């Protein structure tokens, strides 16, 4: 069950949940971005939005995905999408931009710019974050 803030219309887990209270349109986050970057976002959104009990909202700089807690954040940058998710261990590899210990878990960032960057292992890591939190 969720609650919608009457001021910003952001869907939250409960009435007392702390959040940045401002109306931000998804279109404004992608203003000036390439069509390819928007397609990449759309593909990610189509996958993750179908998972059970996922709330999706926007803030001034990012799109936030919540399942009990925030498990995934997409920050549109000029030429890439910065994807942040969480893991129990530090992740390493070619696609990992950084993996930093944060409040007992690792915040991992991956940057993608084309549909070719999206693959099953990446979606598996995001799903692990969903299951962990």
Image: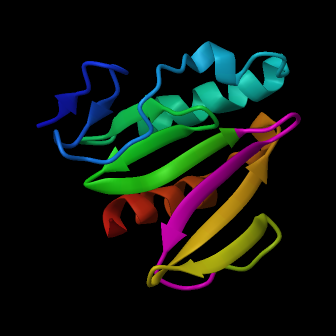
Q: Nearer the viewer, residue 45 or 79?
A: 79
Q: Nearer the viewer, residue 101 or 16?
A: 16
Q: Is residue 61 left or right of residue 77?
A: left
Looking at the image, residue 73 lies above or below residue 29:
below
Looking at the image, residue 43 lies above or below residue 6:
below
**Quadrant that contains the C terminus:** bottom left
Q: Nearer the viewer, residue 121 or 129?
A: 129
The residue at the point 82 percent across, 40 percent down is: 80
Q: Is residue 83 left or right of residue 13?
A: right
Snapshot quadrant of residue 16: top left
Q: How is the image coloured?
A: rainbow
The residue at the point 33 percent across, 63 percent down is: 131
**Quadrant that contains the N terminus:** top left
Q: Number of marks in the image?
A: 0
Residue 72 falls within the magenta-colored stretch: no
The residue at the point 55 percent across, 16 percent down is: 25
The residue at the point 57 percent across, 19 percent down is: 26
Looking at the image, residue 95 lies above or below residue 19:
below
Q: Nearer the viewer, residue 121 or 113?
A: 113
Give the magenta part as a residue range.
76-90
Residue 84 falls within the magenta-colored stretch: yes
The image position of residue 43, as x and y in percent, is 60, 30
The image position of residue 63, as x and y in percent, is 54, 36
Q: Is residue 1 left or right of residue 41?
A: left
Looking at the image, residue 12 lies above or below residue 110:
above
The image position of residue 67, as x and y in percent, is 30, 50
* Residue located farthest toward the left when viewing the structure as drawn: 1
């Amino acid at each position: 069950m969720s609650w919608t803030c009457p001021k910003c219309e952001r869907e939250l887990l409960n009435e007392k949940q702390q959040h940045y209270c401002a109306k931000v349109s998804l279109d404004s986050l992608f203003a000036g971005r390439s069509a390819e970057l928007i397609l990449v976002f759309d593909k990610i959104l189509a996958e993750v939005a179908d998972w059970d009990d996922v709330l999706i909202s926007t803030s001034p700089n990012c799109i936030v995905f919540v399942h009990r807690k925030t498990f995934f954040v997409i920050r549109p940058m000029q030429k890439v999408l910065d994807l942040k998710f969480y893991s129990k261990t530090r992740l390493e590899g070619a696609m990992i931009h950084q993996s930093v210990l944060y409040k007992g878990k690792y915040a991992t960032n991956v940057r993608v710019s084309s549909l070719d960057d999206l693959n099953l292992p990446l979606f598996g890591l995001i799903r692990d974050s969903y299951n962990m939190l």
